[in-house]
Image (spheres, helix red, strand yellow):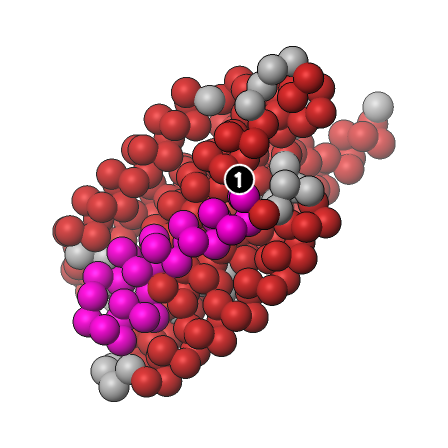
């Protein structure tokens, strides 16, 4: 609910334009990579990576270093461990189950030692509406472009490997290398998402939009398009609502994302009944 007058809202809008741009970029990138997250059954991995990303960001905050850089290092460490050691789903889930409490515990320790403002601590978990400055925005856009270009380059073999890894491997697709590459791209996406939406609720941009799109379509073209649109609407819509309220960004983003999923689930269920 917006609690400020229109004039003040416009002024606030100008102050958070970097966050709006960042949210739009993350909505698109998160929606696109989320399709592969769902196809590869790796929703749990997103949460595991976000916990170590949070630990890296908290360590950087404590040491006075670049928070995004710390977040990226934490994410890439988690992604590498999951990608190299978790080739099988059972092994992967075990590794993630070990990494999650470890990363969360380290992050909480670093935040407890941090002497600065409590808002900085809270923002790493739930996002901050004015947390994105120009250098961070440039870094976020640069990383997002790298992720998008890499996904487009390996789109076909990655799709093949995601849908049927055994057949893809038999046909000569380098499944192991693709797995490590995908985990690296996922780690980068999680790292830059933590800065806006926070570590605890990053799945709202990397899982829910794709899950919603898959409820209403099975088209290899429409699912990625819908997922990106849903991610964009959730992220930007959440920012616009949070500007006029007193709550962090993440409750708004997650609520919009969840509402879209519910609507898509109802539409998908009715379509199947109609057939």
Number of on-image labels: 1
Residue 47 shows up from this direction: yes
Q: Quadrant of residue 214?
A: top right
Q: For the view shown, which residue lies furthest in the front direction?
A: 85
- Image vertical order of residue 218 relative to residue 59, above or below: above
Horizontal and vertical percent for residue 28? 40, 37
Q: Quadrant of residue 30?
A: top left
Whether the magenta-drawn stretch holds residue 139 is answered as no
Report the magenta stretch's main SS.
helix
Q: Dot 1, how many residues are within 10 Å of its Cα: few (below 14), some (14-19), or many (20+)?
A: many
Q: Please tell me which residue is depicted at 35% across the width and 26% down the height of the picture.
A: 149
Q: Quadrant of residue 274?
A: top right
Label 1 SS = helix
Q: Is residue 31 left or right of residue 121?
A: right
- The residue to which callout 1 is attached is 34
Could you tell me which quadrant the C terminus lies in? top right
Instruction: Decide which of 85, 258 is in the foreground and name it.
Output: 85
Could you tell me which quadrant the N terminus lies in? bottom left
Q: Please tell me which residue is depicted at 53% across the width and 18% down the height of the picture.
A: 156
- Image vertical order of residue 41 relative to residue 158, above or below: below
> Which span is picked out in magenta?
57-84
- Image vertical order of residue 272 relative to residue 248, above or below: above
Horizontal and vertical percent for residue 97? 63, 62
Q: Is residue 140 left or right of residue 56?
A: left
Q: Please tell me which residue is depicted at 41% across the width and 65% down the height of the picture.
A: 54
Horizontal and vertical percent for residue 26? 37, 44
Q: Please tell me which residue is depicted at 39% across the width and 28% down the height of the picture.
A: 150
Residue 256 shows up from this direction: no
- Image vertical order of residue 136 relative to residue 231, above or below: below
Whether the magenta-drawn stretch holds residue 74 is answered as yes
Instruction: Decide which of 100, 33 is in the foreground and name it.
Output: 100
Instruction: Decide which of 146, 3 is in the foreground and name it.
Output: 146
């Amino acid at each position: 609910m917006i609690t400020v007058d229109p004039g003040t809202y416009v002024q606030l809008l100008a102050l958070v334009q970097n966050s709006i741009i960042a949210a739009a970029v993350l909505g698109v990138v998160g929606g696109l990579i989320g399709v592969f997250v769902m196809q590869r059954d790796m929703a749990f991995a997103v949460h595991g990576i976000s916990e170590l990303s949070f630990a890296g960001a908290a360590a950087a905050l404590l040491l006075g270093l670049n928070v995004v850089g710390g977040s990226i290092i934490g994410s890439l460490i988690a992604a590498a461990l999951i990608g190299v050691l978790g080739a099988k789903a059972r092994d992967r889930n075990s590794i993630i189950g070990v990494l999650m409490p470890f990363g969360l515990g380290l992050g909480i320790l670093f935040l407890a030692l941090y002497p600065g403002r409590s808002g900085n601590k809270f923002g790493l978990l739930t996002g901050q509406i004015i947390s994105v400055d120009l250098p961070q925005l440039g870094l976020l856009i640069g990383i997002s472009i790298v992720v998008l270009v890499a996904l487009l380059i390996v789109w076909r073999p990655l799709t093949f490997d995601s849908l049927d890894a055994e057949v893809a491997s038999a046909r000569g697709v380098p499944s192991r290398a693709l797995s490590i590459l995908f985990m690296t791209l996922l780690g980068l996406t999680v790292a830059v998402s933590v800065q806006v939406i926070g570590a605890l609720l990053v799945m709202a941009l990397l899982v829910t939009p794709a899950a919603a799109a898959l409820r209403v379509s099975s088209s290899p073209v429409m699912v990625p398009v819908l997922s990106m649109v849903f991610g964009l609407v959730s992220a930007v819509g959440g920012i616009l609502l949070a500007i006029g309220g007193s709550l962090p960004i993440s409750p708004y983003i997650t609520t919009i994302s969840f509402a879209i999923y519910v609507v898509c689930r109802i539409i998908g269920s009715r379509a199947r009944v109609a057939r």
